Amino acid sequence: MRCLLLALPFALLPLAAAQAHDDHEHGSLGKHEHGVATLNVALEGSTLEIELQSPAMNIVGFEHAATSDAEKKTVAAARAVLEKPETLFSLPAAAGCSLSENEVRSPLFGNAEADHDHDHDEHADGDEHHHEHSDVDADYSFTCKQPGELKTLDLSAFYKQFPATQKINVQLIGPSGQQGVESTPANPRLSF
Ligand SMILES: [Zn+2]
């Protein structure tokens, strides 16, 4: 009994440390790097979840609230595209996936908080650049009739639509386990 209680805090430690690290890397207020987006893809049963987190810079080319008509048009167009994820993430037709949930958030869309305080990597030397950074977050859920046919996910259309995106760090969870993949425009195809 005593041994078990003593062992417990040590057993919990690595997990807590891992979670803290994870929050830092992927939390919505963590630092972001222009050109780099994060994508979490999880297939469980017949449900496919896709979570996108991207600097607004990659999506519309700026991160402040749209003021000019041109900026407002750009924001509206980007939002319309993001709300049709079927056109951004090419899923094999044989899998028969249909969109069941769709949530797109950004301070630029007026439905999320801006991230005012974090600095860019290039400003980590302590200079006082407090840009207003904004992310675009999207959560999608698909229901697939034949999830076994879901062998690939192609991001070509996403890169084509948002060419300022140079890299997507992907966490993929599927029937064969979890894998981290670095996707680029030259390497847009993910395999489950
Ligand atoms: Zn930024």
Image (spheres, helix red, strand yellow):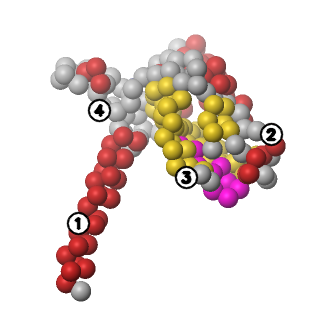
Q: Nearer the viewer, residue 135 or 51?
A: 51
Q: Position of residue 11 (x, y in %)?
A: 28, 67
Disc 1 is placed on an element classified as helix
Q: Position of residue 89 (x, y in %)?
A: 67, 34
The extreme front residue here reads 176
Which tag, 3 or 2, sits closer to the chain's start? 2
Q: Mark 1 to mark 4: distance in Å? A: 34 Å
Which tag, 4 or 3, sits closer to the chain's start? 4
* Disc 2 packing (10 Å; few <14; some 14–19; many ≥20): few
Q: Mark 3 to mark 1: distance in Å? A: 27 Å
Check contact, mark 2 vs mark 4: CB within 8 A: no
> Would residue 102 be found to the left or right of residue 124 on screen?
right
Q: Position of residue 2 (x, y in %)?
A: 19, 84
The magenta segment? 40-48
Instruction: Report if residue 73 lies within the magenta region.
Output: no
Residue at figure coordinates x 58%, y 13% from the top left: 70
Q: Position of residue 47 (x, y in %)?
A: 67, 54
Q: Which residue is mark 4?
A: 117
Give the amino acid type for the residue marked by disc 3 in the picture: Gly
> Would residue 145 be found to the left or right of residue 133 on screen?
right
* The label number, if any, that marks residue 93 in the structure image: 2
Q: Main secondary structure of the magenta part?
A: strand
Mark toward the viewer: 2 or 4: 2
Q: Quadrant of residue 99?
A: top right
Disc 4 is placed on an element classified as loop
Q: Quadrant of the C terminus?
A: top right
* Disc 1 packing (10 Å; few <14; some 14–19; many ≥20): few
Q: Which residue is mark 3?
A: 177
Q: Which residue is mark 1?
A: 10
Which tag, 1 or 2, sits closer to the chain's start? 1
Residue at figure coordinates x 81%, y 43% from the top left: 94
Which tag, 3 or 1, sits closer to the chain's start? 1
